[in-house]
Every structure is written in C-alpha cells, then in structure tokens.
Image (cartoon, helix red, strand yellow):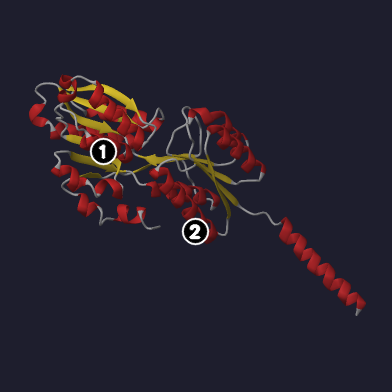
C-alpha cells in the first residue's frame, strides 16, 4: 500500500511538473493609453478583441497601455523577458520607438506594427487605415464641392493631428489631389484634441483681421474630434466679423460628429468625413494570431475608408463599419 501511495504521489508530481514546464504561447499587445475619444475606443476594442481571439486559439495574452514613448520602450523589454511570441505594437511615435522596437526583431520575434509607421524598418507586417487615400479623396471632394469657385483662389485652414506619419500621409494625400487654387492660410497642430482645436479656431477668429477671417471658405481637419472643436468655435463666435466657412472636413465618422450633421447644416456648415474606425486595431491583433498559427503574414495591410457627408450619413450609421465600431457599447 505504501508503495502504491508513493507511486501515485510521484505520478501526480510528474504531471504537475510537466504542466509547469509546458510552454505557453503569448501574444503581447502594446498600445497608447486613452488620451482622447478615438484612443479610448481603440483601447476597449484592443482588450476585448485580444481576449476573444487569444482564448479562441488557446493562447495567453497581455494588453499593455502606456502614456509615453519611454513607458512603451520599457514594456517592450518587459514582454521580451516574459517570453512574448509575437508583438502587436501601436507606437506613440514610430521613429522615437525605433531603437526599442529593434530589440523585438533582434530576438527574432514577429512584430506587427499598427497605425503609425516606423521609417526604414523591417517589421513582419504593418496594418493601418489608408491615410493617403483618405487625404487624396478629401482633396478630390474639395475640388468637387468648390468646383464653381476654383477659377480663382479658395482659402482654407488646416488642423493637423500631430507630426506622426498619420498626419503626414493625410496632408500629402490631400495636397496631391486638391486644386492648386486652394490656398492654406494657416496650419495648426492640435495633438488630436477637441479643446485645443476649439481654442485655436477661436483665437484665429478673434485675432485676425475681418478680411482674413472672411476669406476662409473651408477647414481641412485630420480628425472628427478636431472638427468638432472647430465647429464649436464657429458656432460660438459672437463678434462682428463675417464668417464664410462653408465646409469642414474630418476623419473617423463617430457618433458625436454624425449626430450633429443636421444641426451644423442648418447653421450653414456642411461636413464631410472619412471612416477610420478604432475597431480596426482588432485586425492587427488578428494578424498576430495568424502568425502564431503558422500562417504567412507580411507586407502592408490597409483598411478601406468610406466617404460620409450630409447626403449619406444616415445610411452609413446603419452599415457594418459603424455597427461594429459600437458593438461594445
């Protein structure tokens, strides 16, 4: 009997040790903390999407958020030491994170870059919104909207997101297709902030001469929250200068913007936005899962965009892209 008990104990111990030594497969998802609405939605989708996909495939996972490039660099080192088998990385700023990201490649760990590019870098694959096409289509839209006025100059303002590849691609795309008679009177960098954009627009309206304010007919923005700030400033202006802005553009097409299309149309401001959903981070995570499953993943993956303006925004809100974006609510 004693021998049987000893044997059983040894067998249980052996099974336990085997379980402890069994290698787990780990996907590490590193993204910026929520500092505005879009990133807040993205974090929610990243957490929910990673959990769902990892559990469906029997993988371990970690989703880490960070406030700064330094924090994100430290997280890369941490996850390498914890044995991550694949990284999905949304850099705060691609080029500033280049050295830290190189550590992943040096360890021969597959790396999926999401949203913001790292220049001259050899990652496994990258996935992002089609920012160049968004810019190009926006320039084309401006051409059509102001078709009858482009025999002379049409003055606009540009409100950029930041200095990342996202903003650069959107600007470059826009000016590659926009008519040469569009004249950008001033550029602003908003860091994707509604409040910053509103303050910048308010300052423009109050500090510039009546002639300069009156000549602006459109505002090209890089983001819906930025557009909402600009529109709030235009609506709230109570001075004696004439405002001739007819069109305000945006990117992302969130509820907060779309629900105000009719309101701002009655005030004389038309809008156009291009879809860019925070839920598309899940597509990058899926690429990481595909790598872990032995599938071939490489190159650049671009997520299609849709044009949404006063003529079709209600139909867009019934479509798949919009529905999936708000599926976590």
Q: Quadrant of the C terminus?
A: bottom left
In the drawing, does residue 328 fall left or right of residue 106? left
Q: Measured from the top left, where is residue 283 in percent x and y?
A: 42, 49
Furthest-right residue in this view: 2
Mark 2 neighbour density, 10 Å: few (under 14) some (14–19) many (20 or more): few
Disc 2, SS: helix
User: Which residue sits at x=32%, y=40%?
Assistant: 225
Nearer-the-camera pick, 140 or 195: 195
Q: Measured from the top left, where is residue 120 in percent x and y?
A: 48, 27
Residue 327, numbered circle: none
Above or below: residue 246 compared with residue 281: above
Above or below: residue 121 compared with residue 129: above
Image quarter of residue 308 = top left
In the drawing, does residue 110 fall left or right of residue 282? right
Q: Measured from the top left, where is residue 100 in percent x and y?
A: 58, 32
Q: Gap between marks 1 and 2, in whole Å?
A: 39 Å
Q: Measured from the top left, where is residue 311 in percent x and y?
A: 15, 47
Disc 1, SS: helix
Furthest-bottom residue in this view: 1
Residue 52, numbered circle: 2
Nearer-the-camera pick, 309 or 269: 269
Nearer-the-camera pick, 137 or 277: 277
Above or below: residue 300 compared with residue 26: above
Above or below: residue 58 compared with residue 266: below
- Tell me the mark number nearer the camera, choosing from 1 and 2: 1
User: Which residue sits at x=40%, y=27%?
Assistant: 163
Residue 232, numbered circle: 1
Mark 1 neighbour density, 10 Å: few (under 14) some (14–19) many (20 or more): some
């Amino acid at each position: 009997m004693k021998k049987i008990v000893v044997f059983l104990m040894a067998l249980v111990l052996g099974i336990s040790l085997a379980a402890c030594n069994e290698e787990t497969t780990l996907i590490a998802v590193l993204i910026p903390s929520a500092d505005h609405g879009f990133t807040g939605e993205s974090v929610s989708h990243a957490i929910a999407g990673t959990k769902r996909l990892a559990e469906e495939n029997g993988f371990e996972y970690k989703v880490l958020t960070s406030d700064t490039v330094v924090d994100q660099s430290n997280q890369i080192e941490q996850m390498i030491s914890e044995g991550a088998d694949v990284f999905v990385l949304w850099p705060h700023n691609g080029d500033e994170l280049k050295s830290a990201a190189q550590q992943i490649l040096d360890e021969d760990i597959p790396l999926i870059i999401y949203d913001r590019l790292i220049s001259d870098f050899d990652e496994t694959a990258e996935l992002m919104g089609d920012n160049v096409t968004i810019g190009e289509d926006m320039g084309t839209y401006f051409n059509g909207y102001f078709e009858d006025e482009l025999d002379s100059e049409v003055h606009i303002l540009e409100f950029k997101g930041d200095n990342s590849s996202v903003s650069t691609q959107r600007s470059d795309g826009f000016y590659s297709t926009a008519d040469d008679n569009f004249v950008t009177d001033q550029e602003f960098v908003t860091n994707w902030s509604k409040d910053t954009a509103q303050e910048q627009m308010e300052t423009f309206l109050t500090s510039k001469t009546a002639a300069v304010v009156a000549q602006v007919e459109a505002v090209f923005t890089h983001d819906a929250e930025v557009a909402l700030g600009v529109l709030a400033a235009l609506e709230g202006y109570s001075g004696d200068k004439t405002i001739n802005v007819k069109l305000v553009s945006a990117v992302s097409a969130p509820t907060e913007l779309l629900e105000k299309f009719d309101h701002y149309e009655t005030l004389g401001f038309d809008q156009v936005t291009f879809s860019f959903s925070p839920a598309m981070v899940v597509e990058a995570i899926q690429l990481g899962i595909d790598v872990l499953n032995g599938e071939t993943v490489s190159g650049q993956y671009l997520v299609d965009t849709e044009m949404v303006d006063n003529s079709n925004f209600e139909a867009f809100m019934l479509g798949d892209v919009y529905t999936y974006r708000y599926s976590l609510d």
